[in-house]
Image: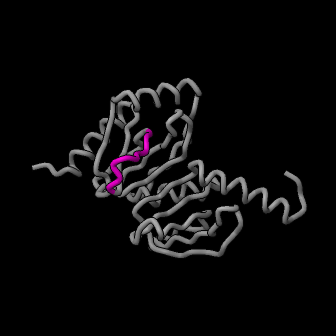
Amino acid sequence: MATFTDNITRYLRKKSKSGKPVSVYALQDAENCDVGYVLDASRKQLLLASMDPQGRYDGYIAYRMKDIHRLDYDGLYERNCHALYRLQEQEHEPVRLKEKSHFVNLLKHAKRNGLVVTVVRVRGQDHQVTGLVDDVEKDGTVKRLVIDWRGREDGKAVFSVDEIVRVYCDDSDEHTRMLLQKLYKSKKTGSEM
């Protein structure tokens, strides 16, 4: 008999082929969802090209499949987001899917493109780290330059991919931190942006 995760995975794979967005509810938060296009879904993880409610690019999200408790698709909300995304000619750069782990795929994408990520670790929302990816080693060790909410460097973090429950990449919060970091660095070096 198919499990809930099996059914969700099957629906997500269908949606990835259809090119239509889905709304994903995770971490037992029935009120809030992320909407976007399914880039890939495995039994363990989901990779989503995210958009905001106005249909604008909002980065990428990788989830643990076991944290997803609801999936909506083909509703008015999803159709409106899809239409707005197309009308505004929004795009997401392709993410290379070379590794089995979508967390690793997304972290490597962020490193290649200089994008800020927020990694949520097993211990919950209070165990988030936001910054630029320095390296993802073969043993699953992630090294990151931490950036505070003002865009300033705030040390480094090292942790295992096995601790990750979700990765946000280049959403509006991360994009703001990246811009502030560039501004802060330009002021620090005396150059103008």
Rendered view: 80 above or below 104: above
The percent coordinates of residue 41 (x first, y second) are 34, 47
| Residue 190, percent from left and from top | 90, 62
- Residue at 38% across, 58% down: 100
* Left or right, residue 140 beside residue 14: right
- Point out the stretch of residues depicted in magenta: 28-36
Q: Residue furthest front?
A: 31
Residue 162 visible in the snapshot: no
User: Where, by quadrant of the figure, is residue 144 drawn?
Assistant: bottom right
Determine the image quadrant of residue 72: top left
Q: Residue at x 29, y 46 (%)?
A: 70
Left or right of 152: which side holds 107? Answer: left
Q: Residue at x 57, y 68 (%)?
A: 135
Q: Most extreme residue toward the left, as rendered?
A: 1
Q: Nearer the viewer, residue 24 or 157?
A: 24
Specify whether residue 65 is painted magenta.
no
The answer to whether residue 85 shows anywhere in this view is: yes
From the image, give the main secondary structure of the stretch colored magenta. loop
Left or right placement of residue 177 versus residue 85 in this view: right
Total residue callouts: 0
**Residue at image coords 88%, 53%:** 192
Where residue 179 appears, as percent x and y from the top left, is: 71, 53
Residue 165 appears left or right of 44: right
Give the image's coloring scheme: one colour
The percent position of residue 16, horizontal first and vertical second, equals 37, 37
As drawn, 84 above or below 192: above
